[in-house]
Amino acid sequence: MRKFDTTVQMLKYKVLKEVARNAFEGTLVESISDIPKSIIPGNKASLRCCVYKERAILSERVKLAIGGDKRNPNVIEVINIACDECPAGGYNITSACRGCIAHQCKEACPKDAIMFDRDQKAYIDKSKCIECGLCFKACPYSAIADYKRPCEKACKAKAISMGQENEAVINNDKCVSCGICIYKCPFGAIMDKSFILNLIDIIKKSEGNTKYKVYAVVAPAVAGQFTYASYAQVVSGLKKLGFYKAVEAALGADMVAYKEAQELKEKGFLTSSCCPSFVSYIKKHYPDMLKHVSENLSPMATISKCIKDKDPDAKVIFIGPCTAKKMEIQLPQVKEYVDCAVTFEELQALFDGRGIEIEKLEGQDMEDASYFGRIFARSGGLAEAVKEALAEQNSSEFSYNPISCSGLDSCKAVILKASRKLLTENFVEAMACQGGCVSGAGCIHYGDKNRRDVDNYAQKAGKNISESISKTEI
């Protein structure tokens, strides 16, 4: 049984599982220093230069698993000791250079940084180079390589640079906490802080306590994540873990779709507010466009508000694929509704840390949301849902013209056009992760299968949006 796609994910999971196990058993303080030793057998390091470095890195992973650096407001952090294997970066001329006489690379360089040795092979004077990439584009032999780090390439918010020791540095003023750098780092040197200890504390205090109930709000991207068990068994696992009830975040998505359809009719132009990374991107990079972002809370916050309106003493935990949700729940307009946010990766560690084998449980289905609420998990789903909501509101007179964009590069292109009043569409569905929430950094598995699984899961819904909202039972 393969629970994760990569070895890096497995390393992270092992630490999280040990932290969860010890926290549930009440032995975390005594055993936390031994966690790295329990993961590395004997004295043989299988992944690093020596077992001592491996243990030092795992100690840093443990720190992140129990909440990370409290002085750093960002949920994404770099493990500096693990970030030393990538090349320094920048453009370099390789042995593929033919020493041609055209010297197109030199002609393209605006700073005269291209030099030649006595064999007429080109090289770059780094003291002059400004990393513009024009030589890279000009070389007819593709002899110039861009050694930009995977995390830096992946970050479309341009929030990652190199520090004095060539370690990755995250600029919190630019970072939108999407977490794509986490998945793209081949050495597992970037991680999201975990708040599973908060969750475990909430659950343990609720056991045998009639004062409050603990609700799990589960994102629709869960479909297909736990490949060795059914979705219904995941719900049963949540009950066994200590949750009073599992509620679909997709039900909140139905409510949001209905409200955004109304807001769009009133304003004439609107961008979605469901993706916290996209909203953060607008705030930090295009603040003038913030007035066009929907005023509605995200599906997570919307359904959590419903839960707390009905049960003010309730504790609400969001479970999904998104690292940015850990930032969203700290916002003033959200924090009173959601008490903690964890990822699917962390949920797997919680199950195993408490010895819950979900594949052996009898399943319990959830039938809260509509088809349209459930497809919010993938790109295009929100746009379809707003179209349906307009139809259910008998708004045929309104001319609906949506555009869906996923990945920050795509979002940036659309927002630039909108800011210059060149965009012909009147509704922008924007998601920071390529393909939508089904590719979130907290996923267990990645790939096109996630989208298909979400669509198959959505097909099982037997309600339209209005019915879903009217028959809501928390």
Image (cartoon, helix red, strand yellow):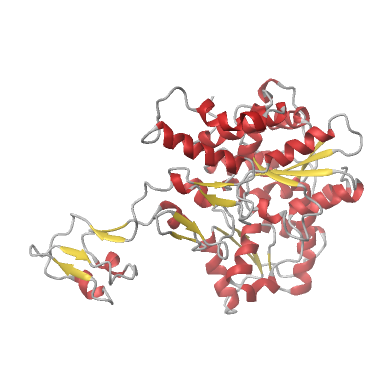
Whether 148 is drawn above or below 20: the answer is below
Position in image of residue 255 (x %, y %):
80, 54
Q: Is residue 459 left or right of residue 122?
A: right
In which quadrant is the N terminus drawn?
top right
Residue 413 in sight from this viewpoint:
yes
- The picture places residue 76, in percent across and down from the top left corner, at 57, 52
Residue 120 left/right relative to 416: left
The residue positioned farthest toward the left in the image shown: 118
Image position of 75 (left or right of 318): left
The picture quadrant where one finds residue 153 is bottom left
Q: Residue at x 73, y 39 (%)?
A: 199
Q: Quadrant of the C terminus?
A: top right
Which residue is at the front of the view, 331 or 395? 331
Residue 394 horizontal/vertical position (percent): 82, 63
> What is the quadrant of residue 281 in the picture?
bottom right
Q: Residue at x 74, y 32 (%)?
A: 238
Q: Is residue 389 left or right of residue 94?
A: right
